[in-house]
Amino acid sequence: MRTVHATRYVTPLREGGSLPAIVEGDDEGLYVLKFGGAGQGPRALIAELVAGEIGRALGLPVPEIVFATIDADLARTEPDPEIQDLIRASATRADGGAAINLALDYLPGAVAFDPLAFRPDAALASRIVWFDAYLSNLDRTPRNANMLVWHDRLWLIDHGAALYFHHASRDFVDRAAMPFAAIKDHVLLPFATLLGDADRALSATLEADTIDAIAALIPDEWLGDDGHADKPAQRTAYTRYLTRRLEAPRAFAEEAERARSLHV
């Protein structure tokens, strides 16, 4: 995965509670930066990375994800003290090294998804619903769809709320077989008429080696200290959870089918 260095803070995106921002990278590209020093903590970045890269591996429309570093000096030009603190907290690790943040390719001119203005096809809608049920993503509702329309194509953004249970439980692997009841609130569920096809195709596409390679991308500093598991073991827990979740019968896919039947 590429790493870019943020050379200019362009503007905050106040739609998100973590105050992501548009920044310019040293490759002259624009990115939406997710700060490691934000209140949600590094596990939100883990969810963003793991979910986003799984989405890309499944062929879903997720913007390119990169690691990003940022200079604390950029805070000097920002009048907002909250943003100044956020930049400084996300620039340097405790040991003095450059902190690793996450960024997504910025889609200039993209507009928020509105189901009344843009109707996704059934195959794509079904694949996205399956994907979000698989990853327990709480944040794809009519109130907060976290999707953009860009060049007449739907794009998935903001996966920090996926894998939500890892915020509170070290033993989340035991939850792999659980359904995901919140899928009933998914904004695309009314369009997802091909969930069975999506389940068969995507569960066969996603291989254990791919999941393991994605988990291996998680930086050490995001894993933190865990008295019950070292950092390699923490990465292995994500691999085990995501691999086990694909085993049949997939309760999350069955739950999505049940929720979809209520919309018929």
Image (spheres, rainbow, N blue to C red):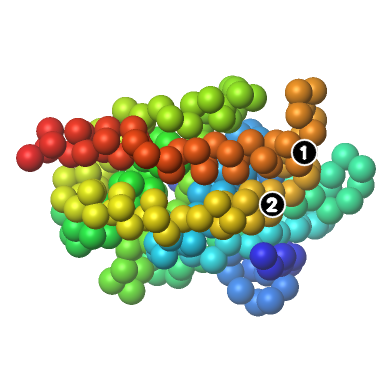
Query: x, y (%) of residue 70?
Result: 76, 57
Q: Mark 2 highlights which residue? A: 216
Crowding near the residue tagged with mark 2, few <14, some 14–19, many ≥20 C-alpha atoms within 10 Å: some
Residue sitting at the far right: 95
Q: Give the position of the N terminus as an image quadrant.
A: bottom right
Secondary structure beneath dot 2 equals loop
What is the quadrant of residue 136 in the picture? Answer: top left
Q: Is residue 160 left or right of residue 66?
A: left
- Quarter holding residue 184: top left
Q: At x 56% / y 27%, what residue is drawn?
A: 172
Residue depicted at 62% across the width and 51% down the height: 212
Query: What is the x, y in percent for residue 241?
Result: 54, 37
Name the residue located 65 percent from the left edge and 77 percent from the top edge: 28
Which amino acid, mark 1? Lys
- Crowd class of label 1 (few under 14; some 14 to 19; many from 20; radius 10 Å): some
Q: CA distance from mark 2 to mark 1?
A: 10 Å
User: What residue would you read off at disc 1?
Assistant: 231
The quadrant of the picture occupied by the C terminus is top left
Residue at the far left in the pictured view: 264
Between 180 and 34, the residue placed more toward the observer is: 180
Q: From the viewer's perspective, is 93 left or right of 216?
A: right
* Rendered position, 129 above or below 71: above
Camera sees residue 187 = yes
**Position in image of residue 92 (x %, y %):** 83, 48
Q: Is residue 208 left or right of residue 75?
A: left
Return the x and y of residue 197 as percentages of the image width and height: 24, 54
Provide the secondary structure element on which disc 1 rests.
helix
